[in-house]
Image (cartoon, helix red, strand yellow):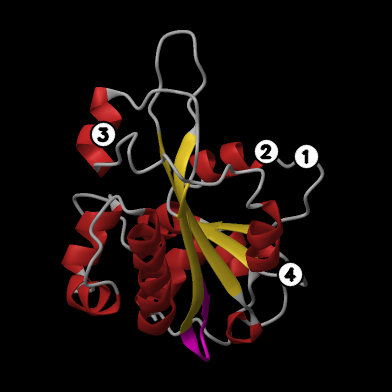
């Protein structure tokens, strides 16, 4: 993808994972994935959401956050078996996540993939609105009154559900692009949020 192409001409895939939680001597693993397709022109589109099987026990702390139980995973597919669908959703799109370290790490299960470039809505929010008291996804959506729209889209879901959080990141990105009139700006502005450039945007 050409980073000089206008943001309005791009297609995005917003992804979120929920995990089993870190435990002593074991690497954290995903237990749910959510992907929401979004574009500036068409808004939210197709989505993917699935629990993911694992032989690793979900920690008490993780379950307290997202509420996912071993029973939820009993009939779930593995991350590897979902590879064709994940590839279909992410290929040839700008990939978005809020604090994208976890998402990048879990996708390393597929070596040699060409997903990306990546946008981190956490970094963008810090650049666009540096004086906000919190940059947690839920706090940002609450601050910008995006939660009613989220609940309209996903009435049966809640925070820390992977698809709910992915859609929240998409709406946050949409809000940022609209508020700062970025649609005709180059994609590179989102890929590399240079603070001096963002300060100029806030003054204009």
Q: Nearer the viewer, residue 115 or 61?
A: 61
The boundaries of the magenta stretch are: 37-43
Count of numbered circles in the view: 4
Left or right: 75 with respect to 90?
left
Q: Is residue 131 visible?
A: no
Q: Nearer the viewer, residue 152 or 6?
A: 152
Location of residue 142 (image quadrant)? bottom left
Asked if the stretch drawn in magenta spans residue 157, the answer is: no
**Label 4 secondary element:** loop
Which residue was labeled with disc 1?
111
* Tag of residue 108: 2
The percent coordinates of residue 169 (x first, y second) are 39, 63
**Label 2 secondary element:** loop
**Real-space CA distance between mark 4 and mark 1, rounded to the nearest whole angstrom:** 17 Å
* Tag of residue 63: 3
Q: Are marks 3 and 1 in contact (CB under 8 Å)?
A: no
The crowding category of the residue bearing disc 3, from other C-alpha atoms within 10 Å (few below 14, some 14 to 19, many at least 20), is some
Q: Earlier in the sequence, mark 4 or mark 3?
A: 3
The percent coordinates of residue 183 (x first, y second) are 53, 85
* Tag of residue 92: 4
Look at the image and tell me in which quarter the N terminus lies: bottom right
**Real-space CA distance between mark 1 and mark 2, rounded to the nearest whole angstrom:** 6 Å
Location of residue 92 (image quadrant)? bottom right
Which residue does the image show at 78% across and 39% down from the upper left? Answer: 111
The percent coordinates of residue 55 (x first, y second) are 49, 25
Location of residue 146 (image quadrant)? bottom left
Q: Are marks 3 and 2 in contact (CB under 8 Å)?
A: no
Asked if the stretch drawn in magenta spans residue 41, the answer is: yes
């Amino acid at each position: 993808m050409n980073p000089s192409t206008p943001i309005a001409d791009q297609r995005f895939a917003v992804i979120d994972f929920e995990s089993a939680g870190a435990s002593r001597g074991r690497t954290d693993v995903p237990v749910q994935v959510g992907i929401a397709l979004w574009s500036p022109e068409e808004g939210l589109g197709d989505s993917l959401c699935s629990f993911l099987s694992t032989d690793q026990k979900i920690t008490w702390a993780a379950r307290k956050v997202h509420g996912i139980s071993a029973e939820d995973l009993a009939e779930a597919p593995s991350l590897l078996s979902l590879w064709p669908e994940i590839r279909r959703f992410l290929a040839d799109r700008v990939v978005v996540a809020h604090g994208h370290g976890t998402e990048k790490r879990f996708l390393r299960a597929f070596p040699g993939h060409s997903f990306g470039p990546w946008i981190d809505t956490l970094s963008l929010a810090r650049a666009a609105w540096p004086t906000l008291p919190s940059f947690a996804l839920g706090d940002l959506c609450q601050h910008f009154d995006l939660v009613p729209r989220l609940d309209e889209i996903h009435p049966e879901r809640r925070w820390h559900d992977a698809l709910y959080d992915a859609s929240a990141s998409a709406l946050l990105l949409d809000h940022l692009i609209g508020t700062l009139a970025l649609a005709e700006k180059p994609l590179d502005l989102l890929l590399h949020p240079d603070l001096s450039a963002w300060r100029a945007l806030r003054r204009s």
